[in-house]
Image (cartoon, helix red, strand yellow):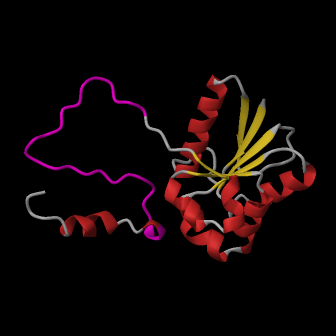
């Protein structure tokens, strides 16, 4: 299958959408598919379009649906889509309407969708590489790692504020 993945994150970016696109492309190639990653869909012939980010990929979603009304179009909802854009942005909302399937990265996100869209939604859990060797947790400390492309829209200090609410014995 020829698969096009669009992501608003440019090549060589380390942003989450680009990392997701690269990971998914690798997995799909391992399954025998041919995969191309583009910032914008430019009319390349493919069997399916996977668009990361409903609002920022709207031009690609709209063009693909107009040029290929019968082909599958998958829109992957990112965190900023899910908890912001799909509730307020007309282009993000239109991307959802044009999609054959919606992919979310965690199951509680389905409740953020309008009722008529929920049947199209599927959850694909993000993955991480398994560490090599044995990892032994430290017994005298409790460590927490907050990872991601932290920026104000993602409330990067929420974990630190939550940690202050834990009992001292934690």
Q: From this view, report whether residue 89 is shown above or below residue 111.
A: below
Specify the quadrant of the image occupied by residue 149. bottom left
Residue 142 within the segment the image draws in magenta = yes
Q: Where is residue 121 shown, x and y percent of the image?
A: 65, 53
Residue 155, given in percent of the width and then of the height, sits at: 40, 69
Residue 12 seen in render: no
- Residue at the spot 30% in from the left edge and 63% down from the top edge: 159
Residue in front for this viewpoint, 79 or 107: 107
Question: Magenta residues?
Answer: 129-153
Say which of 167 and 164 sits in front: 167
Q: Is residue 146 magenta?
A: yes
Residue located farthest toward the bottom when viewing the structure as drawn: 88
Q: Main secondary structure of the magenta part?
A: loop
- Residue 36 falls left or right of residue 150: right
Can you give x and y, in whole percent of width and height, for residue 30 in the image?
Answer: 62, 24
The quadrant where residue 61 appears: bottom right
How many badges with numbers are in the image?
0
Tell me the residue at 77%/51% (across/down): 100
Q: Image height check: is 131 above or below 161?
A: above
Q: Considering only vertical position in the picture, is 9 above or below 113?
A: above
For the N terminus, the image quarter is: top right
Residue at the spot 78% in from the left edge and 55% down from the top edge: 60
Residue 25 seen in this snapshot: yes
Pinpoint residue 64: horizontal percent, then vertical percent.
84, 51
Which quadrant holds the C terminus?
bottom left
Say left or right for 30 vs 69.
left
Residue at 63% x, 74% y: name it: 87
């Amino acid at each position: 299958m020829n698969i096009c993945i669009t992501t608003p994150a440019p090549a060589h970016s380390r942003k989450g959408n680009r990392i997701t696109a690269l990971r998914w492309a690798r997995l799909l190639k391992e399954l025998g598919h041919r995969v191309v990653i583009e910032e914008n869909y430019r009319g390349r012939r493919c069997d399916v379009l996977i668009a990361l980010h409903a609002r920022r990929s709207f031009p690609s979603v709209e063009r693909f649906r107009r040029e290929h009304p019968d082909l599958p179009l998958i829109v992957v909802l990112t965190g900023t889509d899910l908890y912001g854009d799909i509730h307020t942005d007309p282009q993000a909302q239109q991307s959802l309407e044009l999609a054959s399937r919606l992919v979310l990265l965690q199951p509680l996100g389905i409740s953020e969708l309008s009722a008529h869209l929920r049947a199209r939604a599927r959850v694909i859990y993000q993955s991480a590489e398994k560490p090599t060797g044995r990892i032994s947790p430290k017994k005298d400390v409790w460590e927490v790692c907050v990872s991601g492309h932290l920026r104000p829209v993602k409330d990067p200090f929420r974990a630190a504020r939550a940690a202050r609410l834990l009992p001292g014995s934690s």
